[in-house]
Amino acid sequence: MAMRAFYNEIKSMKLREVPAYLKPKFTWENIKKSADQAVDRYIDKYIETSSVEPLFHVCIGGMIFSYFVALPHERRHLEHQQQHGGH
């Protein structure tokens, strides 16, 4: 929904006007404010309601993180297998 609102704001602009429009939005203050609002919305939606979903978010995030940590090792292993004709 936020992306749709952002798109609607910039779709009528000319391309050279977009950087001047975006520059004030990418300040540390605005980024921090947006992050704080996102955390507040997450707390209201999941933590305050005693939902079990934050546990799922942690588990899924941990699986994604471990996948990316193991990915370089797995790619080296696959490359080594392909070089030596293994399956």
Image (spheres, helix red, strand yellow):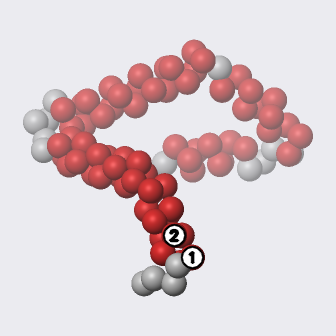
Give the CA separation, mark 1 to mark 2. 5 Å
Residue 44 place in picture, x, y as percent: 24, 31
For badge 2, the amino acid type reads His
Q: Secondary structure at mark 1?
A: helix
Q: Is residue 65 left or right of residue 5?
A: left
Give yes or no for contact between labels 1 and 2 (Cβ–Cβ under 8 Å). Answer: yes
Residue 57 in sight from this viewpoint: no
Q: Quadrant of the C terminus?
A: bottom left
* Residue 83 - label: 1
Quadrant position of residue 29: top right
Question: Is 76 rendered above or below residue 8?
Answer: below
Q: Position of residue 78 (x, y in %)?
A: 48, 70
Q: Nearer the viewer, residue 8 or 23?
A: 23
Q: Which residue in the protein does label 2 denote?
A: 80
Identify the residue shown where x is 80% and y is 34%.
Answer: 19
**How would you rate the neighbour count of disc 2 (Cα within 10 Å): few for under 14, some for 14-19, many for 20 or more?**
few
Q: Residue at x 37, y 47 (%)?
A: 65
